[in-house]
């Protein structure tokens, strides 16, 4: 049966045992902090989430709606590029477009892919949302 100790005591024991092994205390505590889920001092510890922006805006500010079939087994896919935002923002726009077009789709590397050949409908929906749209590709 093991004895229950507080997190602070445990970290202190861990750093003390690592200093005797000729390692720095910071190196020993860092992996523990990365895997830490709960602390008696602060409660549940949530992992830090980054709000990384995805996508790349074009110089003219317009979105490009492009029809692609290469490398997709002959299936037609519309790609919408030129949008910038977090993954959640792009996913929300993608979800709305998929519902309006009654088709599938996803967000990959900041580009929205819609699995339908409805360029005019998608361009109209994006213009209603206030975006400037250009149709590109075949």
Image: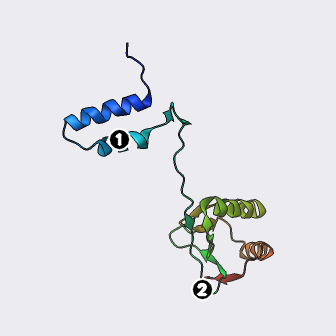
The residue at the far right in this view is 128
Number of callouts: 2
Residue 28, percent from left and from top? 31, 41
Residue 12, percent from left and from top? 34, 33
Instruction: Give the answer, above or below, for where 101 lies relative to 27.
Output: below
Of residue 29 and residue 62, the one placed in the foreground of this image is 29
Which residue does the image show at 55% across and 63% down from the upper left?
52
Q: Which residue is mark 2?
A: 59
Residues marked 2 and 1 touching at CB (< 8 Å): no
Which residue does the image show at 49% across and 36% down from the upper left?
37
Q: Is residue 6 left or right of residue 55?
A: left
Where residue 60 sits, quadrant-wise, is bottom right
Instruction: Give the answer, above or below, for where 61 lies relative to 26.
Output: below
Of residue 21 and residue 109, the one placed in the foreground of this image is 21
Instruction: Give the answer, above or below, for where 26 lies relative to 134.
Output: above
Label 2 SS: loop
Residue 130, percent from left and from top? 77, 76
Q: Quadrant of the C terminus?
A: bottom right
Q: Which mark is residue 118?
A: none
Which residue does the image show at 51% across and 46% down from the upper left?
47
Of residue 27 and residue 77, the one placed in the foreground of this image is 27
Q: In terms of sequence position, does the residue under pointer 2 or pointer 1 come before the other?
A: 1
Q: Nearer the viewer, mark 2 or mark 1?
A: 1
Residue 14, percent from left and from top? 31, 33
Q: Is residue 93 left or right of residue 109?
A: right
Q: Which residue is mark 1?
A: 29
The residue at the far bottom in this view is 60
Q: Residues within 10 Å of mark 2 (few under 14, many from 20)?
A: few
Q: Is residue 89 left or right of residue 129?
A: left
Residue 94 appears in the picture as rendered: yes
């Amino acid at each position: 049966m093991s004895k229950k100790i507080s997190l602070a005591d445990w970290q202190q024991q861990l750093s003390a045992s690592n200093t005797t092994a000729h390692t720095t205390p910071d190196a020993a505590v860092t992996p523990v902090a990365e895997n830490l889920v709960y602390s008696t001092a602060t409660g549940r510890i949530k992992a830090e989430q980054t709000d990384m922006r995805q996508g790349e805006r074009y110089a003219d500010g317009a979105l490009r709606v492009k029809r692609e079939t290469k490398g997709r087994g002959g299936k037609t896919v519309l790609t919408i590029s030129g949008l910038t935002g977090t993954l959640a923002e792009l996913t929300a726009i993608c979800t709305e477009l998929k519902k309006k077009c009654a088709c599938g789709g996803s967000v990959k590397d900041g580009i929205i892919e819609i699995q339908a050949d409805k360029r005019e409908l998608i361009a109209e929906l994006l213009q209603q949302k206030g975006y400037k749209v250009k149709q590109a590709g075949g």
